[in-house]
């Protein structure tokens, strides 16, 4: 409705309509570091982040090791009241949203996905919030949990072979908001990031939003803002002395 009304009046509009972001993880990464950062990404705001990396595409020869490292870190996430200093992940926003997350886990498993790390409802002593445990699913990327936005602390994992397959799987989605590439080979990172069919792409990081840089999606993730080249971002970083935290 917003797009229709703005279009009819020639009013510029930017639409950000959610995503199903991919993290393409190559076999030359520091597994421990990459796993820790991606666990941090899907548990930030209890996974209620449109540009999150909710599809983990992992090069086949490190797949098992990466999953093991991620599971260990997810099991250690401290779930609790969001104002408690020791809490690492708070509740989702409502009972409706918690039921949505749990429902996707059920539909994913019913559709053939493997429950690598079982999620589910979480109880926090003295708190009545809508808490859920982080979860990892794995299997065919045709699964509903790999195709639709869940908006919770859930990632869907799948292996890939070579670079071309990794890029193809990352782009094989109706969404196009934000992806990331993980590798110690920066030439490959730049090459892969430029081939993402998404409004935003990160290298060895995810959910890094810089003030003053356009941000938007393509396909069903929205429109407007434009895609910024890596060279533009590098120039931006070279010419600033301070990056203010969000």
Image: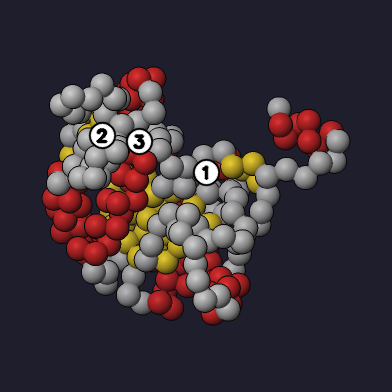
Q: Is residue 95 above or below residue 78?
A: above
Please give the residue where the numbered disc 3 appears in the rendered image.
Answer: 152
Residue situated in front as seen by the camera: 212 or 117: 212
> Of helix, strand and loop, which one carries label 2?
loop
Quadrant position of residue 9: top right
Residue situated in front as seen by the camera: 231 or 57: 231
> Of helix, strand and loop, which one carries label 1?
loop
Residue 118: x and y in percent read 18, 34
The crowding category of the residue bearing disc 1, from other C-alpha atoms within 10 Å (few below 14, some 14 to 19, many at least 20), is many
Q: Is residue 55 above or below residue 23?
A: above
Q: CA distance from mark 1 to mark 2?
A: 32 Å
Q: Please identify the quadrant where the N terminus is shown.
A: top right
Q: CA distance from mark 3 to mark 1?
A: 17 Å
State yes or no: discs 3 and 2 in contact (Cβ < 8 Å). Answer: no
| Label disc, if present, on residue 81 of the rendered structure | 2
Sequence order check, earlier mark of 3 and 1: 3
State yes or no: discs 1 and 2 in contact (Cβ < 8 Å). Answer: no
Residue situated in front as seen by the camera: 98 or 4: 98
Q: How many marks?
A: 3
Which circle, 1 or 2, is nearer the viewer? 2
Sequence order check, earlier mark of 3 and 2: 2
Residue 67: x and y in percent read 19, 52
């Amino acid at each position: 409705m917003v797009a229709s009304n703005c279009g009819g009046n020639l009013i510029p509009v930017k639409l950000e309509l959610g995503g199903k972001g991919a993290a393409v993880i190559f076999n030359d990464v520091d597994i421990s570091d990459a796993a820790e950062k991606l666990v941090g990404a899907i548990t930030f705001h209890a996974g209620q982040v449109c540009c999150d990396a909710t599809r983990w595409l992992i090069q086949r020869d490190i797949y098992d090791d990466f999953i093991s490292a991620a599971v260990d870190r997810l099991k250690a996430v401290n779930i609790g009241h969001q104002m408690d200093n020791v809490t690492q992940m708070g509740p989702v926003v409502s009972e409706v949203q918690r039921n949505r997350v749990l429902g996707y886990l059920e539909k994913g498993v019913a559709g053939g996905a493997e429950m690598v790390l079982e999620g589910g409802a979480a109880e926090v002593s003295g708190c009545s919030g809508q808490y859920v445990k982080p979860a990892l699913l794995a299997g065919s990327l045709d699964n509903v949990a790999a195709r639709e936005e869940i908006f919770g602390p859930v990632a869907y994992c799948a292996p890939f072979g070579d670079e071309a397959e990794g890029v193809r799987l990352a782009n094989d989605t109706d969404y196009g908001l934000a992806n990331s590439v993980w590798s110690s080979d920066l030439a490959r990172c730049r090459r892969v990031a430029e081939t993402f069919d998404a409004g935003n792409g990160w290298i060895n990081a995810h959910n890094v939003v810089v003030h003053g840089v356009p941000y938007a999606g393509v396909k069903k993730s929205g429109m407007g803002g434009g895609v910024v080249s890596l060279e533009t971002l590098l120039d931006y970083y070279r010419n600033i002395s301070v990056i203010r935290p969000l």
